[in-house]
Amino acid sequence: MKKLKEYTEEELEMMGYDDLAYLILEQKNKKMKINDLFKSVCQILKIDAERNIDKIADFFEILTTDKRFTLLKNGYWDLKQNHIEKVIIEDEEEEIEEMPEENLDDENEEKEKDFFDEETDDDTTEDDLKDLIIIDDEDESEM
């Protein structure tokens, strides 16, 4: 990006206050209070900052809505790119204890054996069946 001194007066006049503020903060490489930043913009545009002090509210609104700027503690403004925190994400792989396939097959076989080896209580099944009624097809036609 060009330095402020490399721009013509016409180019500077065509720029918005936000673009000029961006160039100022970028080239000075330090945070600034809004009044000082506004005065620097006015100085570049060769307008009287004291006479245009009523426009500082508009300037403040421009800075707050432009995502390139950030408001810091004590009323200082700076470029957001200078205050981006670096986040380091480390991959923590969970250690999964794998069993050899042989052991898995043995375990499954044991479970199957236990299931089929269980004794069943035949008495309970007979009690459950005592209330059942058997209907013949012939009985059905009589109804």
Image (cartoon, grey):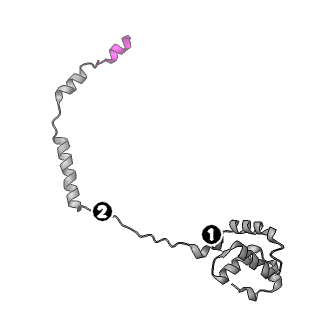
Residue linked to disc 1: 74
Residue 64 versus residue 125: which sits nearer the camera?
A: 64
- The residues colored magenta run 131-143
Q: Quadrant of the N terminus?
A: bottom right
Task: Describe the element under mark 1 as helix, strand or loop.
Answer: helix
Residue 73 versus residue 11: which sits nearer the camera?
A: 73
Residue 105 versus residue 20: which sits nearer the camera?
A: 20
Describe residue 105's horizontal placement relative to residue 17 as left or right: left
Q: Residue at x 67, y 83 (%)?
A: 27
- What's the residue type where badge 2 is placed? Ile
Q: Residue at x 33, y 13 (%)?
A: 139
Q: Position of residue 127 (x, y in %)?
A: 21, 22
Of tags 1 and 2, which is closer to the observer?
Answer: 1
Q: Is residue 92 visible?
A: yes
Describe residue 48's horizontal placement relative to residue 89 as left or right: right
Q: Residues within 10 Å of mark 1 (few under 14, many from 20)?
A: few
Residue linked to disc 2: 96
